[in-house]
Amino acid sequence: MQTTVSGRIVDIQKNPMSGIEIGIQPIDITKSDRYPSIYGEIALRTRTDSNGDFSISGISSVPVEFKLLPVDMANYMIKTIDVGGVTLYSHRYFGFSRMPIGITKGQHLKNMLFTVEPRMKISGQIIFNDGTPLRNRPVKLDLRPSYLWESLRSRMDGSIMTDKEGYFTEFVRGAATYTLSVEYFNLSAFSDPIVLQDGDQYDKLVLKLSEDTGKPNRQMVDSDNEEFDRWRAMQEVWVVNPANGHAYKTIRCKSWWQAKRKAEEEDAYLVSINNVEEQNWIESLFSQNDFYWIGLRLTSKGEKWHNKEQIAYSNFAQNTEVLTSNSENKHVVLDAATKKWIGINKGSPFQQFVQDAIIEKDEVQVNSD
């Protein structure tokens, strides 16, 4: 029994949006998962007509997730969906351009109304000193907003690909003062502060590469940002788990090995999670939107904790590979959103998103009167 959905996509002023591509992807929602598990491909997709109308039929798996396409690069985000007299509001937890919905098999949902708004973004061109565009090349990007949540939790620090004329686009999450830098081999370029209000799209940025290795002025983002300084101070505070008397905190790092070295410098070790109670305590303490290195390594000879404890508990995601004797070693990440562990190969592009680690110490000095 198949399902059909139809409706219209409009902007905030209720004007019809033509040419918007929308797709449907099956998802799996279970009580143990905070976020739906995605399976299958986006096999069903369509574009709105001149009146903003769309229709998708032949849906055989439910529930589903509606997505504006292309995935993660759509120019618009879903703000609300009105269906059957109920208004569903999007949440940043589910991403900008998608929304999960439960549909009964065989149901025909009509007159759905999607309200969308433009995603905030910064677009620009990267050029050499002589004005020649940097065409179709990967570039390291560091994009930092001024406000606390984004500065610490959603800073972009990875790679982008320029187009045939050297242009690129990065979507951002909210109003802030942004600074942006790029690196291409030994060349670099830095932007002046870019002030964005809600809904702004900045497209006048030109970055000229040079061999000047000087750092940008980040006073508004880092040193003069009182909230940022307070957060940095909080990073130095150990938090004690009353169940085992051990202390925990997070550190910034570029790799598992750097995190290991930093932990050892503090007479600590990358966290070992020995039971579900400790896992739950860590979940309650640290951010729900980050990835953290933990002390577990997966090798052809078995699993090993940094502190050499025996493996007594695990919480791997279902799609984590089982290593064979020929498999590459992996280091393990805690995904704070799904609460699952993920093994990552050394060369995985996913590593760029892991910039924190949780470290643990058996004892801490407590000052007493």
Image (cartoon, rainbow, N blue to C red):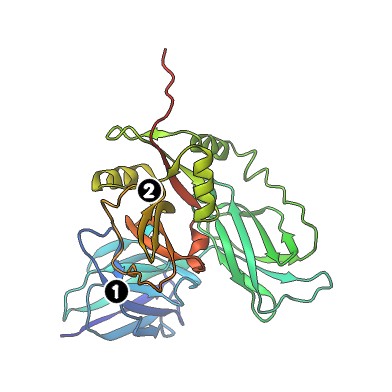
Q: Position of residue 357 (x, y in %)?
A: 46, 49
Amino acid at the residue labelled 2: Lys
Foreground label between 1 and 2 = 2
Q: Quadrant of the rendered structure where residue 28 is?
A: bottom left
Q: Secondary structure at mark 2?
A: loop
Instruction: Point out residue 321 in the picture as x, y percentages from the top left corner.
Output: 34, 70
Q: Is residue 204 visible?
A: yes
**In what element is the residue under mark 1?**
strand
Nearer to us in this view, 283 or 174: 283
> What quarter of the picture does the N terminus occupy?
bottom left
**Which residue appears at 41% of the width and 51% of the height?**
294
Mark drawn on residue 112: 1
Q: Is residue 85 left or right of residue 234?
A: left
Residue most extreme to the top: 369
Question: Which residue is more in the foreground, 33 or 274?
Answer: 274
Q: Camera-side residue: 209 or 54? A: 209
Q: Residue at x 49, y 60 (%)?
A: 353
1 or 2: tag closer to the N-terminus: 1
- Placement of 13 over or under 213, stated as above or below: below
Other residues around mark 2 within 10 Å, as few (<14) / some (14–19) / many (≥20): few
Q: Quadrant of residue 281?
A: top left
On the image, the x and y values in percent for residue 37 come to 29, 68
Q: Residues within 10 Å of mark 1 (few under 14, many from 20)?
A: some
Identified at 54% across, 38% down, the residue is 232
* Amino acid type, callout 1: Met
Does residue 231 appear left or right of residue 207 in this picture? Answer: left
Residue 29's disc is: none
Report, in whole angstroms, how far the alpha carbon at label 1 lies from the one at label 2: 56 Å
Residue 117 in the image: above or below residue 360? below
The percent coordinates of residue 2 (x first, y second) are 19, 85
Residue 308's disc is: 2
